[in-house]
Image: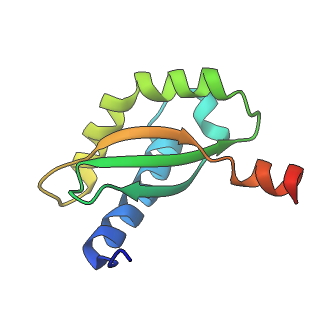
């Protein structure tokens, strides 16, 4: 059983909140306006962050390409907002939980 780390949980929540604000306030890509960050999973060493997201229009491929192109922008802006030694690598992943609930529920 994995022991929960307060630091890890706090950093994950800070990344989620700040990345959501960056998407709304600082990004000029209209695709990101309907995007929701649903969660952040950090690796044990805090070097990688899996960013779970959904989008109202649901065009997974175009959104993922746009998110991946903007990774550097996101990390730079997170570095300005977060007081941490290292900003993790961002890995974007579609959150299929809602789809599973609708179609399998």
Q: Quick one: quadrant of the C terminus?
A: bottom right
Q: How is the image coloured?
A: rainbow
Which sits in the foreground, 81 or 93? 93
Residue displayed at 42% across by 21% down: 69
Which sits in the foreground, 37 or 77? 37
Residue displayed at 47% across by 38% down: 92
- Above or below, comparing residue 92 to residue 30 in the picture: below
Which sits in the foreground, 27 or 56? 56
Percent coordinates x, y for residue 21 in the rendering: 47, 51
Left or right: residue 61 compared with residue 8: right
Left or right: residue 61 compared with residue 41: right
Q: Quadrant of residue 40?
A: bottom left
Percent coordinates x, y for residue 31 in the rendering: 63, 29
Residue displayed at 36% across by 31% down: 71
Percent coordinates x, y for residue 39 in the rendering: 52, 57
Q: Quick one: quadrant of the N terminus?
A: bottom left
Percent coordinates x, y for residue 10 in the rendering: 33, 71
Residue displayed at 35% across by 38% down: 74
Q: Quadrant of residue 63?
A: top right
**Identity of the residue furthest to the left in this view:** 85
Report how many numbered discs are placed on residues in the image: 0
């Amino acid at each position: 059983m994995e022991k929960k780390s307060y630091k890890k949980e706090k950093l994950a929540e800070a990344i989620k909140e700040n990345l959501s604000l960056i998407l709304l306030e600082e990004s000029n890509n209209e695709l990101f306006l309907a995007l929701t960050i649903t969660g952040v999973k950090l690796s044990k060493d805090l070097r990688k962050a899996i960013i779970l997201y959904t989008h109202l229009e649901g065009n997974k491929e175009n959104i993922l390409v746009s998110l991946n192109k903007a990774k550097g922008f996101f990390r730079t802006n997170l570095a300005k907002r977060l007081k941490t030694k290292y900003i993790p690598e961002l890995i974007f992943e579609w959150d299929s939980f809602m789809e599973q609930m609708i179609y399998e529920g």
